[in-house]
Amino acid sequence: MELNKLTAHELLDLIKNKKATPQEILGSVHEQIEKSEKDVKAYVRINENTVVATASDERSVPIPIGIKDNMCILDQETTCSSKILKGFKAPYNATVIDKLKKSGALLIGNTNMDEFAMGSSTENSCYGTTHNPWKLDCVPGGSSGGSAAAVAANEAIWAIGSDTGGSIRQPASFCGVVGMKPTYGRVSRYGLIAFASSLDQIGPITKDVADSALLLNIIAGYDERDSTSVDMPVPDYTQALENNVKGLKIGIPKEYFVEGLDPEVKDAVMTAIEVLKKQGATFEEVSLPHTDYGIATYYITATSEASSNLARYDGVQYGIRELAKKTRKSPLLDMYDETRAVGFGAEVKRRIMLGTYSLSSGYYDAYYLKGLKVRTLIKNDFDKLFADFDAIIGPTSPTTAFKIGDRVNDPLSMYLSDIYTVSANLSGIPAISLPCGFSKEKLPIGLHIMTKPFAEEMLFRIAYTYEQNTQWHKQRVEL
Amino acid sequence: MTATATRKYETVIGLEVHLQFDTATKIFCGCANKFGETPNTLTCPVCLGLPGALPVVNAKALEYAIKVGLALNCTINPFVKFDRKNYFYPDCPKAYQISQFDLPICSNGHLMIETADGEPKKILINRAHLEEDAGKLIHDNANNCSLVDYNRTGTPLLEIVTEPDLRSAEEAYNYLQNLKLTLQYLNVSDCDMEKGSLRCDANISIRLIGETKLGTKTELKNMNSFKAVKAGLEHEINRHEAALESGQTIVQETRL
């Protein structure tokens, strides 16, 4: 039995029945890393000495986990896959890290990502590209590509990612795993290095829906250190895992099935809908009239916030510092210029420029403020639908994983791979991507489900029902 | 100030007072809010602006701001928000100051003063908003470098902004005296200008009597006593008058 190919809930059963130990599980994960990491490159840092706590209580979850490289871990390097943060060791733990450590989680390493979570392919990393475990010359998606690839490659049992416009769900879709973005405010972001504060959310990347619910149980909840976290009780999400969608009403937005959608992806999603129909859910075509403005609104909002959030990387306190060889403006201004010129990659610079422009006086009203207004319209579309529907369903991404290098010189086509996912961030709602098939090229396809705010249980219920009646989540990569 | 000039020209002054609250902790974190400690001993990830850290507003600071707002006859706004003022400088570790832009906690107040003739006069207060103080740069010329002390970073500040209602340096002086008395009575700050607990910036311009448009202003900053404010304003009034009288134009500038 290859322990590393099992899910967390399967492993916990084995531990409980004394058929496996956390050490053995950790060992099997490290063995896999030894074997395939040179090809996948999911990690930017691997902890050689992951400590397995000896005493553990009933709730203890001693499962090996990968952490995206944008969450602060006490005294360990965290870089957001950016040169500018090289050497930065946080003097504190992010709240999710505290919660994971308390649960007995085995932190095996930091996973690769697009620099500062800006990208959809994990190609924008100062450590190099992560490869899709299903097809090594393809991208794993992004920005949490390292986390998704680590889980798909069985180099982690599960992983933590962050999702600003689809950064958990799109790579989960590309790598054939389950990626979930909780409601904005459901998981504390204290210690998550900010990209776009009004959109960022932390969530689980797992092999199946049951694990997703289990991991969300561990990380969810109010945190007094994050004012945007919501003070309401966290249900036991595993209780929502019910193989039953009878009577549920699910909307299929017509705007999601248009030009640009790969026919193979479309077919897989339509087949998935048939599966749920058989289980008693009813489907209806619906409209989200402002869908077309999603990508534009997202890129205005996210880049504006990023330009402000990333201004602190100036060479003064931490990370790298570069000085000019010859004084141009002043030693201080030259230090800012040089540090940021050397430290940031091309995509991050592009977004800082876009965001600075949108926020600058004279353009603020036309771009940023207008973006905020359109964002409200997009949110209203969803609010209206959720008055009548339990969920909305569609593809996670218009295509399967594309070839490494194919879109690096075409940022617009790269941005379009997030077309179905950004609206969940813009409207703050929870969403999940789960495997629903493979293309002829043996690349995974993702099914995307969204529900109203704080209806994660409904999300899990529908996803779980789909899973119980299909086999896609049992597929494992051989590497 | 010459008597003839005041008859020809009218002085227009607006004041911005920064008041440090003496809350036990800083405005967005739990660090002690104290003056004169060893540099960089009163810091944490939040006030250092470290990656991933998030601000949580100090309820006491809000309470103090409301107290001041009520004493200054302001409207206390039921919905307030914080904004970011972006700028690069080493004393500002996030490269933005958290402040309030369009929805300040207090607006539309006033404070009574006495004019030179002993008449009561209402000075309108445009707004009072909460923000965080910056750190302190220490320039070490001997070693040709600058050092940053972040102890002050995140000290709660209330910026109290008047309308351009003051018509002389003396009125400005009277306003500051009355304001300080009110603030001391509220017991929200020690109002010690030498420690920087109370700081004053002034905008000054002059115009021909009867003119309604504001003249070009000079901004005066970093004055460490009310007497210095008065003297600085008097100097500027004379300088503006002399310039206009000799046919020159005033160039807008900030004087430190």
Image (cartoon, rainbow, N blue to C red):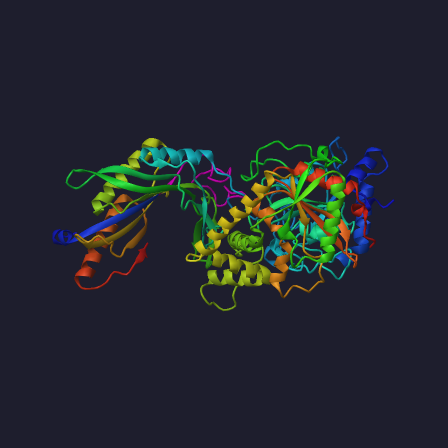
- Above or below B80: residue A442: below
Please provide percent x and percent y for residue A320: 58, 58
For the question of whether residue A44 can be seen, the reply is no
Residue B32 magenta-highlighted:
yes
Which residues, given as a range, are shown in magenta?
Answer: B18-46
Please provide percent x and percent y for residue A61: 74, 37
Q: Residue furthest bottom?
A: A326
| Towards the viewer: B155 or A104 | A104
Please provide percent x and percent y for residue B113: 23, 38
Dominant secondary structure, magenta: loop
For the question of whether residue B203 can be seen, the reply is yes
Please provide percent x and percent y for residue A445: 74, 52
- In this image, B72 relative to A42: left or right? left
- In this image, B255 relative to B8: left or right? right
- Above or below A142: residue B179: above
Q: Residue furthest left?
A: B4
| Towards the viewer: A187 or A475 | A475
- Above or below A291: residue B127: above
Residue B44 magenta-highlighted:
yes
Q: Residue at x 31, y 55 (%)?
A: B255
How many marks can you see?
Answer: 0
